[in-house]
């Protein structure tokens, strides 16, 4: 298992770094593929709770959020981005409820509505939309993505290695019973150190040292929270991994869950410092 994880990382990390560096449509393609795969895995998990989830429209709306972010520089010439975003939000809510209203049977429809909204908004808006927005930030988008992924994924790796080597005390959550206190602390320490280093080197003209330290801690904490939140879904569905697409890592949700909360947080933190600083 460990060496499969290492081999996958050796192959995939350089490729992902190059795509982040190139940006534009190639980066958009990577995000679209990852988000669509995550949504497909999510729909598979949701089948454990309801059979009334339409994966086609759910996947389509997830991709639409990513495209909306990519096209936002063009849209701003005609209308405010917030107008386009809230118009699309309105459409999503109307569609999700309308699809359930006109079914022959209403049993379990509220569960289906909740699951559809959770999947579309969490993966499509929370993650996909903001991953594209972050990369499109003028002059520093690439650096923000490197900060995000470097911090969160190094925190993941640190938690795994420290927990595997020194873990003795269980974290105490039934959501992920194998996680340990030592692993959690190790992940936070590694993520914070890496994040602070990346923030001060790559974004020294954007964030102060205090900002870099705060962001590093915040991303490390939110990365682990995202991981545990995905574990909640998987544990409730009675499965260990969301898929087996990535050898040693599981599925796309397993690999990207730690980005779910950290991505929008980094984007809006940057927006706040830009307007208030």
Image (cartoon, rainbow, N blue to C red):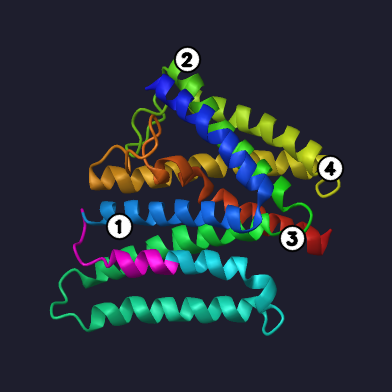
Distance CA(mark 2)–CA(mark 1)? 36 Å
Range covered by the magenta-colored residues: 48-61
Mark 3 to mark 4 CA distance (whole Å): 17 Å
Tag 4 and tag 1, C-beta contact below 8 Å: no
Find out whether residue 25 is within the magenta segment. Answer: no
Left or right, 23 with respect to 174, comes to: right
How packed mark 3 is, by other alpha carbons closer than 10 Å (few <14, some 14-19, many 20 or more), is few
Foreground pick, 29 / 73? 29
Seen from the viewer's position, the closer of residues 238 and 182 is 238
- Which-is-in-front pick, marks 2 and 1? 1
Q: Which residue is mark 2?
A: 166
Q: For mark 3, what is the residue?
A: 272
Q: Position of residue 173 (x, y in %)?
A: 37, 36
First in sequence: mark 4 vs mark 1:
1
Where residue 122 appears, x then y in whole percent?
A: 45, 59
Q: Residue 197 lies in what quarter of the image? A: top right
Which of the two discs, 2 and 1, labels the residue nearer the N terminus?
1
Left or right: residue 141 versus residue 243 is right
Q: Earlier in the sequence, mark 3 or mark 4?
A: 4
Under circle 1, the secondary element is: helix
Find out whether the residues at labels 2 and 1 contact each other: C-beta distance under 8 Å: no
Check the picture and name the quadrant holding the C terminus: bottom right
Residue 17 at x, y = what percent? 62, 40
């Amino acid at each position: 298992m460990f060496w499969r994880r290492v081999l996958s990382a050796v192959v995939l990390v350089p490729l992902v770094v190059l795509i982040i560096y190139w940006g534009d449509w190639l980066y958009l393609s990577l995000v679209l593929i990852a988000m669509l795969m995550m949504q497909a895995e999510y729909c598979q998990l949701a089948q454990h709770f309801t059979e009334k989830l339409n994966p086609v429209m759910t996947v389509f709306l997830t991709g639409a959020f990513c495209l909306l972010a990519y096209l936002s520089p063009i849209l701003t010439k005609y209308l405010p981005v917030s107008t386009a975003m809230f118009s699309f939000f309105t459409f999503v809510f109307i569609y999700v409820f309308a699809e359930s209203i006109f079914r022959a049977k209403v049993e379990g429809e509220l569960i289906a509505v909740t699951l559809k909204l959770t999947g579309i908004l969490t993966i499509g808006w929370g993650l996909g939309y903001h991953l594209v927005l972050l990369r499109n930030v003028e002059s520093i988008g690439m650096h923000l993505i490197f900060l995000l992924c470097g911090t969160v994924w190094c925190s993941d790796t640190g938690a795994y290695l420290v927990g595997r080597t020194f873990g003795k005390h269980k974290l105490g959550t039934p959501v992920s019973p194998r996680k340990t206190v030592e692993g959690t602390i190790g992940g936070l320490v590694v993520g914070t150190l890496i994040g602070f280093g990346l923030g001060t080197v790559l974004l020294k003209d954007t964030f102060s040292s205090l900002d870099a330290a705060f962001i590093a801690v915040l991303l490390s904490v939110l990365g682990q929270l995202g991981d545990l939140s995905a574990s909640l879904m998987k544990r409730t569905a009675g499965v260990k991994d969301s898929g087996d697409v990535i050898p040693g890592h599981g599925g796309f949700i397993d690999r990207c869950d730690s980005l779910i909360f950290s991505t929008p947080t980094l984007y809006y933190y940057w927006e706040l410092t830009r307007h208030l600083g």
